[in-house]
Image: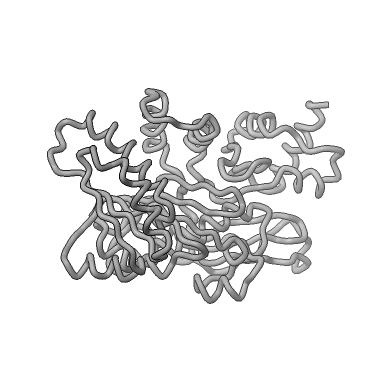
């Protein structure tokens, strides 16, 4: 999966800069780069030759990723960080990954199977995730929550837990960084659940799987709604503000080159941990209320906060807000915001 090795090279060069600052660390820094395509092996070696004069121990492999992870486990070796950048769905690698990842280590994972993860190929979603994914206005976030749920499930099978640190999507790829925990967090079962939405009125709710009974209230007349359910999803936090601040500090120092767009995302994500787990499309709200135009995101979030509710701009999708306001109240505030905006 290392392909040309450029990402592995970045890991090496940038880790060296950080490594110099952490003088208390005495162990050797080791990087493994692997790609099963034998045709990529020559290019991989050439690009990573730039690390030869550093203090990094470099090992380049050319085998199936699952086999490499399993052999590492059989050799009783453990690593601090695993970066999986697969084509399509990476779920088949989760179990062998957790067998070799150290406690408090990091897993960085990419999923490019956008159709199954966003509900556009439900049969594929059931096969690969054992989950029902339906098309949703906040589809990018639904996809991330579906993938985090799959990660949490594989960790819990062996009695371990996870902590999401950073989640990002551009609609085509879904990228997640989690920390692998030795123990399952208390009440972690309440972080797996449903996000149910009425496709007619737009009302929605997040319900823990553990306490699920029914959702019989929406903004429609009784029994006239049309429920769309995504399950099972991770309905807990998807960003860690403390960890994100550490990344922002590193970016501000300037020793490691960080793109301006990335810095902007980090600052936005820090303000949006992902709770409450329901997101609302401002354009859809405006359409259902027959408003001439959608309210500005910043004005709507401030209006919600002034009424005592959570009001956050989503860090995942533009034009989405996160709030705990009841749907009827959200609609009223949205309409009044437009009136004041005009």
Residue 305 sits in quarter: top right
Query: Is 274 located above or below residue 89 in the figure?
Result: above
In percent of width and height, residue 184 lies at: 30, 59
Q: Quadrant of the C terminus?
A: top right
Say whether residue 200 is left or right of residue 79. right
User: Which residue ends up furthest to the top in the rendered image?
Assistant: 253
Count of labels in the image? 0
Residue 77 sits in quarter: bottom left
In percent of width and height, residue 217 lies at: 67, 61
Q: Residue sitting at 49 percent across and 65 percent down?
A: 89
Q: Quadrant of the N terminus?
A: bottom left
Q: Residue sitting at 28 percent across and 41 percent down?
A: 51
Say whether residue 202 is left or right of residue 11. right
In percent of width and height, residue 147 lies at: 48, 60
> Which colouring convention does the figure follow?
one colour
In percent of width and height, residue 325 lies at: 62, 43
Q: Residue sitting at 41 percent across and 24 percent down?
A: 252
Say whether residue 262 is left or right of residue 114. left
Say whether residue 68 is left or right of residue 216. left
In depth, the one of 185 and 54 nearer the eye is 54
Q: Residue sitting at 55 percent across and 49 percent down?
A: 169
Query: Is 319 located above or below residue 225 in the figure?
Result: above
């Amino acid at each position: 999966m290392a392909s040309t090795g450029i990402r592995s090279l970045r890991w090496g060069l940038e880790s060296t800069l950080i490594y110099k600052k952490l003088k208390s660390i005495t162990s050797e820094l080791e990087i493994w780069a692997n790609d099963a395509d034998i045709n990529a092996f020559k290019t991989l070696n050439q690009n990573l030759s730039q690390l030869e004069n550093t203090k990094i121990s470099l090992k380049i492999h050319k085998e199936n990723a699952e086999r490499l992870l399993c052999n590492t486990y059989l050799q009783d070796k453990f690593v601090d960080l695993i970066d999986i950048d697969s084509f399509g769905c990476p779920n088949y690698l989760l179990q062998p990954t957790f067998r070799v990842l150290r406690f408090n280590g990091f897993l960085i994972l990419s999923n490019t199977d956008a159709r199954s993860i966003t509900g556009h190929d439900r049969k594929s979603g059931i096969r690969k995730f054992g989950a029902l994914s339906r098309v949703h206005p906040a589809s990018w976030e639904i996809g991330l929550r579906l993938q985090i749920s799959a990660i949490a499930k594989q960790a819990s099978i062996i009695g371990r837990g996870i902590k999401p640190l950073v989640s990002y999507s551009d609609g085509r790829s879904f990228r997640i960084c989690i920390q692998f925990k030795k123990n399952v967090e208390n009440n972690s079962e309440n972080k797996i659940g449903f996000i149910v939405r009425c496709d007619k009125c737009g009302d929605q709710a997040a319900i823990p799987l553990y306490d699920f009974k029914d959702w019989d209230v929406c903004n429609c007349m009784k029994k006239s709604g049309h429920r769309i359910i995504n399950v099972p999803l991770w309905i807990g936090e998807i960003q860690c503000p403390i960890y994100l601040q550490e990344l922002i500090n590193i970016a501000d120092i300037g020793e490691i080159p960080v793109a301006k767009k990335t810095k902007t995302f980090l600052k936005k994500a820090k303000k949006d941990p992902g709770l409450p787990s329901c997101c609302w499309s401002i354009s859809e709200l405006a359409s259902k209320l027959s408003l001439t135009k959608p309210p500005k995101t910043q004005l709507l979030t401030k209006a919600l906060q002034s009424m005592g509710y959570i009001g956050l701009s989503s860090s995942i999708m533009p034009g989405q807000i996160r709030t705990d306001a009841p749907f009827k109240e959200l609609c009223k505030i949205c309409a009044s915001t437009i009136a004041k905006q005009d």
